[in-house]
Amino acid sequence: MAKIESAFLDLTYLDRLATGDTVIHRLDPRVKVVIAALFVVCVVSFDKYAIAAMLPFAVLLMIIMGLGEIPAGYVITKLVVTSPFAVMVGIFNPLLDQQIVLHLGSWAISGGWVSFLSILLRFGLTVAAMLVLIATTGFNQVCMALERLGIPKIFAVQLLMLYRYIFVLLEEGQRMHRARALRSFQKRGMEMKQYAYLLGQLLLRTIDRGQRIHLAMLCRGFDGTIRIRQNLRITTRDIVVFLAGGMVLIVIRRFNIALLLGNFITDLLQ
């Protein structure tokens, strides 16, 4: 029960963060979506052995989180929870690539370990960027921005409905778990074999709930168009942020800032 409720509260907390009033929140959603997409493209385009070259992107992301007042602990927690997926992707790299590519003192590090760390870093940066985007924009506005940017309407609407359906699924799961716990005595009926039956019932209940929600939306005039109260309007500030942000991302991607900074510090010390 605690896990279901914590998942529900995490999602609602993400929506509450999107209601903030910072310089990042006030930017046009389309600008933030394009910048986030460019950020992801730049990160995933690095060589498989790149690690230090991606660190400036982490610094940039932390600056944005600070400006948007996004708690770092929340983002780190979400990264830790989802990190097993990235671990499973690259866990066999050290076995498949044993060529030595780096020496740290007396330690010889193979290319497999370097590429594995690179995968984890890419995963952390891209997932954190998406979390920051939703936390400073809101999922409704992200979907509307995608539609205004030319994404097919059906895709944007389905993405929005999928996000909202998660709340329905969690709510039904909460009700079933609470009813099951209240009807259990001395932990009877709490065995693992009962979970298959509960999952089937959860699917049926959520399908029925989804049909009722769909009928209610049709009765209220829903025609497949995403509508929110905020009117999207590109301002001079949005244009400046878009140009400056895009230029910074391209410069960080084009030049190895970490290497240049390391060489500069080495020259100063000599």
Image (tube, rainbow, N blue to C red):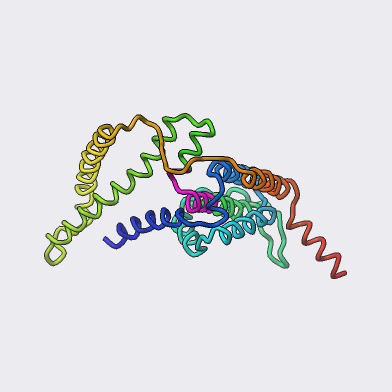
Residue 51, position in %: x, y?
66, 54
Q: Which of 166 and 193 is in front in this view?
A: 166
* Quadrant where the image shows the C terminus: bottom right
Q: Residue furthest right?
A: 270
Residue 172 within the magenta-colored segment of the rendering = no
Q: What stretch is highlighted in magenta?
A: 128-141
Choose between 49 and 239: the one closer to the eye. 239
- Residue 136 forms part of the magenta stretch: yes
Q: In which quarter of the image is the N terminus?
A: bottom left
Query: Picture coordinates of residue 63 (x, y %)?
Result: 61, 59
Image point 71% across, 64% down: which residue?
104
Q: Position of residue 57 (x, y in %)?
A: 64, 54
Task: Tell me the residue at 64%/44% (across/down).
Answer: 236
Relative horizontal placement of residue 158, taking residue 101 as reference (left or right): left
Question: Is 176 located above or below residue 41 in the figure?
Answer: below
> Magenta region's main secondary structure?
helix
Instruction: Please name the residue shown 48% across and 34% down the image.
Output: 147
Would you say residue 190 is visible in this rendering?
Answer: yes
Residue 84, how many percent across, how many down? 46, 54
Tell me which corner region of the image, top left, top right, bottom left or bottom right, holds residue 213: top left
Lateral position of residue 38 relative to residue 223, left or right: right
In the rendered view, would you say 158 is above or below 182?
Answer: above
